[in-house]
Amino acid sequence: MLNNPAGFWVRFGASIVDGVFLLFVLGFVSLMVYKQFIVEGFSLISILEALYYLLLPVFWHGYTVGKRMIGIRIARTDGEKVGLGTMLLRNLVASLVYVITFGIGIIVSAFMVGIREDKRSIHDFIAGTYVTHDKPDRGI
């Protein structure tokens, strides 16, 4: 069921778009709340960023703003809709794996996306997901 997987560079591009989008949106929220554009350490901004990556794909058929602009989305390998549990596994559990491996897991994941035919990374295997160019079954 892994149709039309997205490779490393397109996923990287979507991450850059997400980063720029969040920089400006959360920067302005930070200006309103904290009176400074960038806040260091744990804050409301950190929570909003985590919620963006956790909830937006659940409610928007696997898309984030960056993925939507680039034309890719997160999908489950079994064809079901991406849910909150899936995104918790993909983001939180995978982040723990990357921290435990002192970042080596991130490098391995990048190579996996670049080399593997199915373009799946460690966090994709943990959550049972992949990133695809295909649109969701239900048109949006």
Image: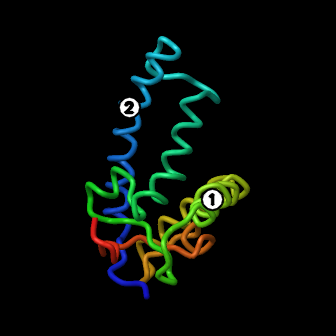
Q: Is 10 located above or below residue 138 in the figure?
A: above
Q: Is residue 112 above or below residue 1?
A: above
Q: Which residue is mark 1?
A: 88
In the rendered image, the quadrant that contains the C terminus is bottom left
Q: Amino acid at mark 1?
A: Leu
- 65 left or right, relative to 79: left
Residue underneath mark 2: 25
Check the image and name the residue furthest to the right.
100
Mark number, residue 121 = none
Mark 1 / mark 2, whichever is N-terminal: 2
Which of the image's four quarters has the N terminus? bottom left
The residue carrying pointer 2 sits among few (fewer than 14), some (14 to 19) or many (20 or more) residues within 10 Å by Cα, namely: some
> Which residue is depicted at the point 50% across and 78% down?
80
Residue 113, image x and y in percent?
A: 44, 71
| Residue in the picture at 35% in, 39% down | 21
Label 1's element? helix
User: Among all residues in the image, which is located at the extreme bottom?
Assistant: 1
For residue 124, above or below residue 98? below
Q: Residue at x 33, y 52 (%)?
A: 66
Residue found 32% across the figure and 80% down from its top = 4
Q: Is residue 68 left or right of residue 94?
A: left
The image quadrant of residue 3 is bottom left
Query: In this figure, what is the number of numbered marks?
Result: 2
